[in-house]
């Protein structure tokens, strides 16, 4: 009977120890911080009309809030385990909320980039055929948006190259072609919202 009680006691200690570790990872400060940062992102995003083109504004709002949290931590408002739990919770809330926004905006920006690449290729091929040589492009200013820039650029560039190669392969080569579309060369796939 004593052996059974000892085994049960040891098992209970192991179970409680595991529960305590899990509870510590999800402490009140962790949960509070996670809710706070999630609500911040959610409210800011809703106030911006969930407009992917206003992601720069969202980053500014969230950045200002993070600056305040960092000041609070540096001023020792949170210390020790409380600071660790609060920091981890705040980061977890930011990441989970921002992931949803990035996924939504990446899909929309890729779709717009594909359309822009296709339209640019159609015009490029028409102009090239009209002049009988590879068309050149007046440089744009690449002003990438934090969310849209990269997904837009990649979609636009890959679609442009593909469609140009299909529609007018004789012009889809050479120096003029290689500088016509890349955002890095301020080509037609440079991201400029204005």
Image (cartoon, rainbow, N blue to C red):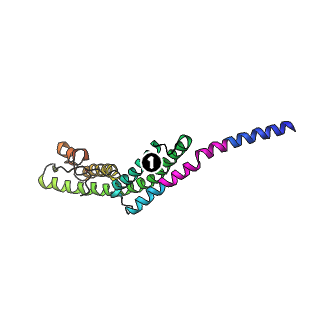
Quadrant location of the N terminus in the rendered image: top right
Q: Is residue 120 magenta?
A: no
Q: Main secondary structure of the magenta part?
A: helix
- In the image, taking residue 5 as reference, residue 60 lies left or right, namely left
Residue 5's spot in the image, x, y percent? 83, 40
How far across and how far down the image is residue 28, in percent? 58, 50
At 71% across and 42% down in the image, what residue appears?
15
Q: Is residue 180 left or right of residue 21?
A: left
Q: Is there any visible trace of residue 112 in the rendered image?
A: yes
Query: Which residue is rendered at x = 41% and y = 59% of the image?
Result: 45
Picture coordinates of residue 128, whole percent (x, y): 16, 52
Foreground: 23 or 190?
Answer: 23
Helix, strand or loop at disc 1?
helix
Looking at the rendering, the stretch of residues picked out in magenta corresponds to 18-37
Name the quarter where the C terminus is drawn: bottom left
Asked if residue 111 shows in the view, the reply is no
Is residue 182 found left or right of 53 in the rendered image? left
Q: Which residue is mark 1?
A: 69
Task: Inspect the magenta stretch and tell me whether residue 35 lies in it.
Answer: yes
Q: Which residue is depicted at the point 38% across and 51% down?
A: 64
- Density class for disc 1 (Cα within 10 Å; few <14, some 14-19, many ≥20) is some
Q: Nearer the viewer, residue 116 or 88?
A: 88
Q: Quadrant of residue 81?
A: top right
């Amino acid at each position: 009977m004593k052996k059974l009680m000892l085994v049960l006691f040891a098992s209970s200690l192991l179970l409680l120890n595991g529960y305590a570790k899990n509870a510590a990872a999800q402490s009140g400060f962790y949960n509070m911080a996670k809710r706070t940062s999630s609500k911040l992102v959610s409210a800011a995003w809703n106030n911006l009309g969930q407009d992917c083109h206003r992601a720069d504004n969202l980053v500014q709002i969230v950045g200002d809030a993070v600056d305040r949290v960092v000041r609070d931590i540096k001023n020792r408002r949170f210390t020790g385990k409380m600071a660790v739990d609060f920091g981890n919770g705040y980061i977890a809330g930011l990441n989970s909320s921002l992931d949803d926004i990035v996924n939504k905006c990446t899909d929309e920006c890729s779709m717009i980039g594909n359309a822009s690449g296709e339209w640019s290729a159609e015009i490029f091929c028409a102009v090239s055929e009209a002049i009988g040589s590879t068309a050149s492009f007046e440089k744009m200013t690449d002003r990438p948006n934090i969310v849209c820039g990269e997904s837009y650029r990649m979609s636009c560039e890959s679609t442009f190259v593909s469609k140009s190669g299909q529609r007018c392969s004789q012009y889809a080569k050479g120096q003029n072609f290689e500088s016509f579309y890349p955002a890095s060369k301020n080509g037609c796939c440079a991201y400029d919202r204005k």
